[in-house]
Image (cartoon, rainbow, N blue to C red):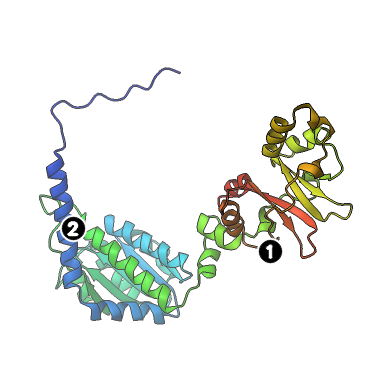
Amino acid sequence: MGSLDLPSPIPNLKINEKTLQNLFKSQQNHINFFFQNLNISQALSFTQLLLNSNGTVFFSGVGKSGFVANKISQTLISLGIRAGFLSPVDALHGDIGMLTSRDILVMFSKSGNSDELLKLAPCARAKNVYLVAVTCVEGNGLAAVCDMNVHLPLERELCPFDLAPVTSTAIQMVFGDTVAIALMGARNLSKDEYAANHPAGRIGKSLIFKVKDVMKKQDELPVCKEGDLIMDQLVELTSKGCGCLLVIDQDYHLIGTFTDGDLRRTLKASGEAIFKLTVGEMCNRNPRTIGADAMAVEAMTKMESPPSPVQFLPVVDHQNIVIGIVTLHGLVSAGL
């Protein structure tokens, strides 16, 4: 394949550093206006409404506000709260059938005058759904037909024409996500419960996976006896992909470990004498170990702890019998 040809830049176009800095400062000021003028009592009533809901909290919106509404619904779902996104267009073509009288419909709109939401509101009300408008313009049409209105104070859009929804969507997101975290605290959601909703993510894996879920076991273990000659165990040392040997007695009790690093040091110190040395003579008889029921993230912490990091941990039971081995590579491959 040839080299990638990047598109030629348009001549005479350049972003001024001072201009960009001023834009960030202006956006900060606009968002600060929101924080300084938000009606906390109104926000609290909204949050309490969602907390007390015994149905599903649906979010809706058009355009950029719709993307924000969808994102906030996904955040609530990840916290174990029944929520969903309802497209105002699709709702009028059958999706409104998912609404029940126990549900809440939260509609995000900067102006509060979006035709799609104004058409959706009376249809949802006909199903006895509790309606909430979250808007930036006071005295709007949507607020007038809803049971509750939350006003998000908007000084102006960052856009020089005060048109492109960039500041309004930012404060919508800040508002929705902050309410979500308030609900998380009020529901006393534990770290384990949160992790259970994110089993494929690193957070979930670190809080759910135990050593026994990621360790090598049985035929995958690089084991040898302390009387075995080092040179006779080179295949076992290199073929199992662990970078070590687990030295055991006849009952599988752990005696020590011998690593490829130990092999190099022994060869350097002993020379040809290595051909007569046993693994037991050169192994580490006080290795770090871990139990199968320990959290996988604990194994990683133990590997990285002083005096020096290690690449593996033998897994032993309460009788010091080897039942597995967990490697740093295995933990990283598991996404921890």
Q: Mark 2 or mark 1: which comes first in sequence?
A: 2
Relative image position of residue 335 (x, y in whole percent) = 56, 50
Count neighbours of disc 1 (C-alpha within 10 A) and say few if under 14, some if 14 to 19, many if 20 or more: few
Question: Residue at the spot x=29%, y=64% of the render?
Answer: 174
Relative image position of residue 325 (x, y in whole percent) = 71, 51
The label number, if any, that marks residue 293 in the structure image: 1
Question: Residue at the spot x=14%, y=71% of the render?
Answer: 138
The label number, if any, that marks residue 111 in the structure image: none
Determine whether, in the image, residue 34 is placed left or right of residue 223.
left
Secondary structure category for the residue under label 2: helix
Determine whether, in the image, residue 261 is placed left or right of residue 29.
right
Count neighbours of disc 2 (C-alpha within 10 A) and say few if under 14, some if 14 to 19, many if 20 or more: some
Which of these two is toward me, 265 or 310? 265
Camera sees residue 30: yes
Which of these two is toward me, 188 or 254? 254
Tag 1: residue type? Asp
Q: Is residue 117 above or below residue 245?
A: below
Which of these two is toward me, 277 or 139? 277
